[in-house]
Image (cartoon, rainbow, N blue to C red):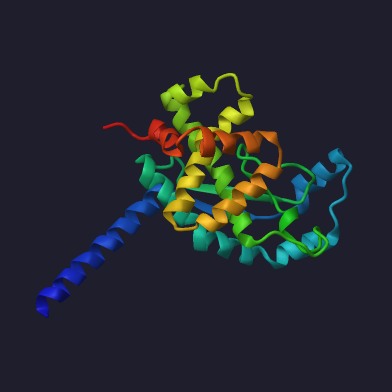
Amino acid sequence: MFKNTIILYVGLLFLISYQLKAQDNIPKVTFNYNFIPFDRTCARITNVEIEETWIKELHENLDKFRQAWGALGPQLLAKTVQKTGRPFKQKELHAAMSLCDINSMSHPLLINMRRFLYTSTDNKPEFLDFFVALVFHELMHIYVYDIRSEIGTTPLLEKYQREKISVINHLHLVALIKNAYIQLGMEPFLEKLIEEDSKLGPIYARSWEIVNELEDYRHFIDELKLKN
């Protein structure tokens, strides 16, 4: 009995230590939305109105989106870092939310929230898991960019050098995304994500085609791993 208690206690300490170490290797991600100055200026430039109802709904649901990320996002990041052996360079990242008619991006980190609101989608918002996936996607751009800045080109990048640069920039990224969801046992959602991503345009469809059908996704991840 005493021996089993000791084993359980040691195992618990190991688990706590592992979790704390994982937290040290991934950034804390924060979210906020302000109409002024960015969205107001962006709306003027794009000449596309941002409706007051959208702004109100987003402000009222900020905590819901933060909680959705907090429940799953850190796990996705931790599985990524665990696989490559490379910690994030950033300790904290701030994601600015936007309702302007522009795409989400990683540099600067900006998340377009239109598709996740009832008022801006005719009461057909995407599920919160897709919000988390979008944030994860943009964070992987930052992560892969930092690694590739260190290691330069790779054999697989050379192999696909004739692809569009946007496709090339997504190859290691979608491989990491696939790995994280598989590691968390979320294959059914991963299938939906790939399907929805591929609808966004040929860049995403081609990136997933290469990683899913033409190559073993793990080979892309191997190229990013920290060498001993």
Left or right position of 14 against 199: left
Which quadrant: the N terminus? bottom left
Q: Is residue 142 visible?
A: no
Left or right position of 33 against 151: right
Q: Position of residue 105 (x, y in %)?
A: 65, 40
Left or right position of 163 against 54: left
Q: Position of residue 73 (x, y in %)?
A: 51, 56
Q: Position of residue 226 (x, y in %)?
A: 34, 34
Establish if 214 lies above or below 187.
above
Q: Based on the displayed image, in which of its 4 quarters is residue 207 positioned? A: top right
Left or right position of 142 against 84: right
Q: Based on the displayed image, in which of its 4 quarters is residue 115 positioned? A: bottom right
Residue visible at 63% across and 61% down in the picture: 128
Q: Foreground: 211 or 174? A: 211
Establish if 81 lies above or below 116.
above
Residue visible at 85% across and 57% down in the picture: 51
Q: Residue furthest front?
A: 213
Residue visible at 50% across and 24% down in the picture: 157
Which quadrant: the C terminus? top left
Q: Is residue 226 visible?
A: yes
Q: Based on the displayed image, in which of its 4 quarters is residue 197 positioned? A: top right
Total labels: the figure holds: 0
Residue visible at 66% across and 63% down in the picture: 62
Q: Position of residue 167 (x, y in %)?
A: 61, 30
